[in-house]
Amino acid sequence: MTHVTPSRKPRIVIIGCGFGGLEAAKALRHAAVEVTLVDKTNHHLFQPLLYQVATAGLSAPAIAAPVRHLFRTQPNVTTLLGEVSDVDVSARMVRLKDGDVLAYEHLILAAGATHSYFGRDDWAPFAPGLKTLDDAFDIRRRILLAFEAAEKEADPTRRAAWLTFVVIGAGPTGVEMAGTLAEIARHTLPGEFRRIDPASAKIVLLEGGPRVLQAMPNDLSQRALEQLRDLGVEVRLNERVVAIDASGLDVQPSEGAGYRIDTACVTWAAGVAASPLGRLLADSTGAQADRAGRVVVEPDLSLAGHPNISVVGDLAAAQSYAPGHPPRAVPGVSPAAKQMGRLVAANVLRRIAGQPTVAFVYRDYGNLATIGRHSAVVDLVSPAGHFKFAGYLAWLFWLFAHVYFLIGFRNRLVVLMDWAWAYWSFARYARVVTGIEPQARSQRRPGSS
Amino acid sequence: MTHVTPSRKPRIVIIGCGFGGLEAAKALRHAAVEVTLVDKTNHHLFQPLLYQVATAGLSAPAIAAPVRHLFRTQPNVTTLLGEVSDVDVSARMVRLKDGDVLAYEHLILAAGATHSYFGRDDWAPFAPGLKTLDDAFDIRRRILLAFEAAEKEADPTRRAAWLTFVVIGAGPTGVEMAGTLAEIARHTLPGEFRRIDPASAKIVLLEGGPRVLQAMPNDLSQRALEQLRDLGVEVRLNERVVAIDASGLDVQPSEGAGYRIDTACVTWAAGVAASPLGRLLADSTGAQADRAGRVVVEPDLSLAGHPNISVVGDLAAAQSYAPGHPPRAVPGVSPAAKQMGRLVAANVLRRIAGQPTVAFVYRDYGNLATIGRHSAVVDLVSPAGHFKFAGYLAWLFWLFAHVYFLIGFRNRLVVLMDWAWAYWSFARYARVVTGIEPQARSQRRPGSS
């Protein structure tokens, strides 16, 4: 006599609801599996537009969709709010910080990245990065309060310091932040102050490397640099930050003498590191973690020796295996995370069906970044080669691409309307400062250390 | 030989940018005066819709307009972000907490009200009130996280406690909060959870008095009560809170035995007190302050013995002096604050011109409150008497009245669009939880004290 175990659906736990985790869960829509989706927050965040929340152009709900609302019509997904404390790979269990335990047959890790201060975490209080909505609110508060403080400051040196804004790192986020800050100072605020001229604000973009937007082709970097300078951004290339404190920062050019900038408003857009979950997983599975804490994965994005654990998005140090080409490192961009999420979901289903898994091939559609009103750079990759353009057309392309990829029809409408309004009126909608008290503690007068 | 002093424009300092302060500053638009408008925040808040931010129906920027943006085309207004620490009436100077000093010839105090726990400030951490955007975010966080916690809770008693929401005080804010909570539980969230049924949530509205909406005529209170009960709100009249802690609250009915409600989500909508500036001013001028800390004013809203200091809005204990009627207390509602602001501005100009000032006459247009989808009560006051209605028509009236009085064309559009979307989809747009960490500290499991 044989025992027939009632067939139970395979349990798949997905950690993280960024682009990778969201796509993996969606790709399992029609599968006979039980998916549990765990995230530290209750929302999927459209990170490419987070800088617009930080610069008061969009409200938070415009780019954040409640996760459980996104999956309301997908009954095989259970959404849980929680933070992972531990993964027990031998018992196949994920432990959450509040004590909950989730058993799995398949685990998909999509916990993403956070900002890295390259070992100088003591800079964090003075130079917030931009990864979460709370980060964006913090930066928005600092920017708006700096103009308020300048209006009240009698001392001209200190006033100039309040009106100095520094962005560190000239990747897409840094370029977008600096461009938007220049627009705010030159177009949004003039006329609203009685004692200062907001247009006199100094926006400094510091970059340790030799050019802005280094992921872009050289000529587009050059165009972006020109557009930034046209907007009035002071771009300083080949210069590194060596110290940051409450009243300013010290800069060291690759040649020549170091100098100091007095400022109370520094944004960190320089470095990213994988979620700490990466090292935790590497420790417990023997997998390799690279310098940024990303987990080195097999061609099919699973872990060596642990085929039931996969890693996607910014947490994975992945290679693309295009037929006829040597393996190539996958960049940390949202299209790559989404493609990884979809592949891993399909591979899990293949494994359940007893079929061989498939290696990841990154399909590169190119790169785009906006600098400000009417200015952007686009590098489209097509089978016929690169298609590069800059300026007004690139800006329109950027705009519609971002609206198209926004999650949820409602949010697309809202963002389009907010942008149309901002375009015609030059006004910025979300200039609301909340939580002034905690801020007052950490923001001191610049130039007074 | 006579010295001719070059004529300097009279300096008017306005403290507070709620409805009263805003109207006073706007009414001085064409006057040859120098206005300085000081507020603790950078925005004018449309408080009648604040409960919708707390219940995730609107984003914060939809109901908050940056003060200096509102006055960008009124050059005689200087806006300052700051908090008053002291008023020196003999030297005619206002001191701000950051050390700034503002001299004035005329002072208008419009600092508004805050919530009062009737001497039980220790309840504040467990039962936040609803006066600022930060309050609204706090309440939104508690509501949304309670449903998240319920989804994770295995113990049925605790799960029921997480799904219990208590609103204390059945004035307009309490009624609106309770009605909206019922809608969220019954219409917005069902289908999104896998382990709990959000529709089983219990919404309790506690009121110490004998009826809801006591400022309304009796029959409209009755209609509102019926509408609340139709929505599934448990309304408990003649019952007082005697203790609140992290895991629930103790209630004492006016007759019968006391009992306990286990809950982690309590909203305080019971009491208001004037800003502490009221008592400060009373101490330094010898003016009377009433029990709620409001300053007793002369018929023209100035202080006895200090004709150059006026008080408006919720900070004033004012009387209306309609010709042919006995003086009547002015209610703490926004139309009254706006009317006081306009009168005081006109009185300041009269005083500057050497003319006698005018007594305040409150023009009462009536009262309205919404309960939920398609339900509201309206009590219109016209020369021909009261015009009372309830239900669908009242709800439409409430809706358009609120949109009409919103500050700024942009915000009207946004709120209308958000409402239209919420109406057709039953979805709530702003379900974003931020600042989870600080919350986790203050919100403990209910029913586990």
Image (spheres, coloured by chain):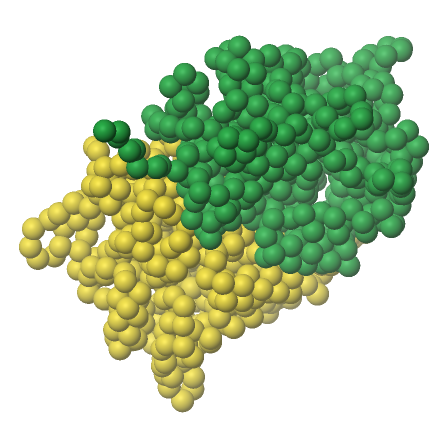
Chain colours: A yellow, B green
Placement of A15 over or under A151, stated as above or below = below
Choose between A407 and A199: the one closer to the eye.
A199
Seen in the image, is B399 located left or right of residue A294?
Answer: right
Q: Quadrant of residue B178?
A: top right
Placement of A142 over or under B207, stated as above or below = below
- Residue B260 image position (x, y, % from top left): 78, 17
Q: Quadrant of residue A159?
A: top left
- Residue B429 image position (x, y, % from top left): 66, 52
- Residue B427 image position (x, y, % from top left): 72, 53
Is residue A40 shown to the viewer in this render?
Answer: no
Residue at x 56%, y 70% (from the top left corner): A404
Is residue B46 shown to the viewer in this render?
Answer: yes
- Residue B435 image position (x, y, % from top left): 52, 38
Residue at x 74%, y 35% (from the top left corner): B363
* Residue at the extreme bottom of the image, as rendered: A384
Choose between A200 and B282: the one closer to the eye.
B282
Choose between B168 and B187: the one closer to the eye.
B168
Choose between B98 and A316: the one closer to the eye.
B98
Q: Which quadrant, please, contains the C terminus of chain A? A: top left
Seen in the image, is B117 located left or right of residue A293?
Answer: right
Residue at x 80%, y 26% (from the top left corner): B324
Residue at x 49%, y 63% (from the top left corner): A425
